[in-house]
Image (cartoon, grey):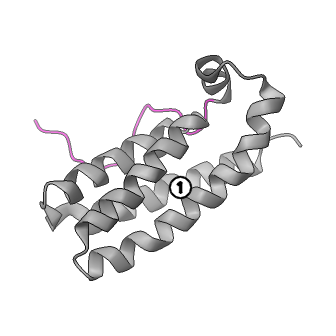
Amino acid sequence: MSHDPTAPAKGLPVLDLDGACEFLELSRAEIMLLVPQAMIEIRDKFERIHPALRAEAFADAARYAHTIKSVAASIGAEAVRQCAETLELHAKTAAPDNCPQLAEALQGEIARLTQAVAALPQ
């Protein structure tokens, strides 16, 4: 049975701030300063993916997905990171057949992340 790359990232944390703090050697207060800008960057790069895919600019789509992957990793958003990594790989290898579905899966994970961030204590 093969793994469906367009399926939700089951079992992965939506947001693991403690893991990010440990990995980056930052305090919770310090990582919380990064989260709002990280969300802006993730949303901005995601908004550019669909136009890139429609234009068959797969290198651009891969670059945007790579940025999302990196930014998501920096705040412990593992589900978003994994979806972005899968999209990046498909776009880079010029195997674009799954890219629209992968972008939709990424959009779903970004929505889950947005909810998790909104629920954080201020």
Residue at (71, 45) in percent of width and height: 35
What secondary structure is marked by label 1? helix
For the question of whether residue 6 can be seen, the reply is no
Please state the horizontal and vertical placement of residue 47, each as a whole percent of the image. Answer: 49, 72
Image-based side of 48 in relation to 27, left or right: left
Q: Is disc 1 surrounded by few (<14), some (14 to 19) or many (20+) residues within 10 Å? A: many
* Residue 36 within the segment the image draws in magenta: no
Residue 37 in percent (x, y) is at: 70, 53
Question: Residue at 89% across / 43% down in the picture?
Answer: 122
Q: Residue at x 39, y 50 (%)?
A: 66
Prevalent SS, magenta region: loop
Q: Residue at x 10, y 35 (%)?
A: 1
Start and end of the magenta stretch? Answer: 1-16
Would you say 21 lies left or right of 54 here? right
* Res 90 → quadrant: bottom left
Side of 15 where 61 appears, left or right? left
User: Residue 100, percent across and down?
Assistant: 28, 69
The answer to whether residue 89 shows anywhere in this view is yes
Tell me where residue 19 appears, x and y as whole percent. Answer: 60, 22
Whether 89 is drawn above or below 48: the answer is above
Q: Quadrant of residue 103?
A: bottom left
Rendered position, 113 above or below 111: above
Q: Which residue is mark 1?
A: 110
